[in-house]
Amino acid sequence: MNVENSQTLILKNIKPNSIVLEFGPASGYMTEYMKKALNCKVYGVEIDPHFAEKAKKFAEEVIVGDIEDYEWVDRYHSIKFDYIIFADVLEHLKNPHQVLLKSLNLLKEEGDVIISIPNISHNAIIMELMEGKFEYKHEGLLDDTHLRFFTRQSVLGLLDSVGLFPTNIQTTVLSPEQTEFKQDYRKFPEPVSTFLKDRQDGHVYQYIVSARKKSSLGNEQLNKKFDLIFDRYDTSKYLQIFWQEEDCKYFSEGASKRYTLQLNRETKIDIDIPSDVLKNRVRIDPVNCEAFIKIYKIKIMLKNGDVLHTYKTKEEISKLLVPIHDLLVNYVQENENGLEFLSIGRDPQLQVNGLEKYSDYNQDIIISIEIKIDEDYKKYLISCWEKLYQHNCFLQKMVGNN
């Protein structure tokens, strides 16, 4: 589990050999991990029949149906669970209070309910509202299938209303420009930006909360004060790779990895690609700022070090990596080795082509990229204009001589 997202945070809370009820397992990523790595017995409830069939491979049983039809109440009434998981589920329900309340009848007295839930009070949404926008998207904080919205206080209020007390609270953190809204603090007056950056929950993307029945806890635990520490505004620069999960139309933060960049110097980054996504769409976001980018060389390798292919020339690299957003290719670069780009925004994107041919190896692969990121992109622009000017003068001279 190399990606620190809500799923991995949830899984770190599950003890081996447990009995687990998982609401909304989708295609069974967590189900598989709990079965294979933790030797858990997992039961599920999934509304999508196609996803349910996949999750069933790793579960004792999966009920296909709407959670709020409550078929699971009778079907699983004789089982007492160590954990009940709601991973990005409660916000999709008409009455999450009622679902939580009924689920507690299936929970062991000292069992845990674990939920992950998006934060509607993220600074990116506040910034959207300040611009008069409230636009639903296909994923994320304003997923168009969300029926309920939560802040930290309302999450804790919901748990309290059903007799649960939080024993652990974790978060995933994204700055506004890292979210699907691609917001930018520089668009707002400095006092406004400062106020937003100082908000404790301003960059919290999701809450991951473990909770127990109040009846199972002593007074000392019930009086526990949480000293929550939240990351502040993240100014680090990073490369991020996304892979499209099976049966998903869109890329998501959950199916991605980030690699910290060292600016203004040539750096080698080894990107791990899981074997089961090689036939799916893969995207590389080379940096999260405006910058000059030069890719010197790319190697496709197996984890044992065997090199399957090397891309060195401008022509070779441009066939592997195709700009799809916020990137301009330098078509006047003098050197045929490597490929130069200009990132003209905070969300440059490259589509990776041709990885499906490596799926025959049935192994994870490594994309090893030798890259340089230079934030002084104005220097690059001046250089390009000078080359274009010289080229234009040369053409005019040739025409004049004829």
Image: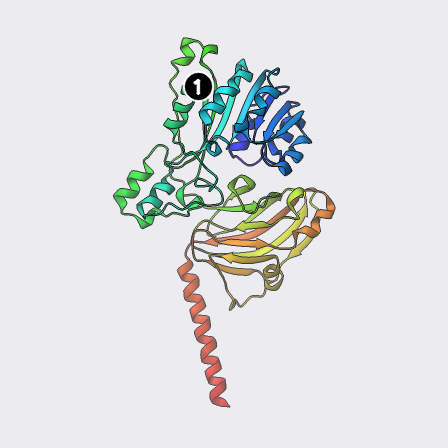
- Does the image show residue 13? no
Indicate the quadrant where residue 160 lies. Answer: top left
User: What residue lies at 41% left-to-right and 10% top-to-bottom?
Assistant: 220
On screen, 258 above or below 114? below
What residue is drawn where x is 50% and y is 64%? 330
Percent of width and height locating residue 104: 51, 18
Q: Residue furthest right?
A: 360
The one nearer the camera, 332 or 166, is: 166
Disc 1: CA contacts within 10 A as few (<14), some (14-19) or many (>=20) = some
Residue 203 visible from this viewpoint:
yes
Query: At label 1, which amino acid type do we have?
Result: Val
Residue depicted at 42% across the width and 13% down the height: 221
Question: In this figure, which residue is indicated by the disc labeled 1?
Answer: 162
Does 196 sit above or below residue 79?
below
| Quadrant containing the N terminus in the rendered view | top right
Q: Is residue 14 left or right of residue 96?
A: right
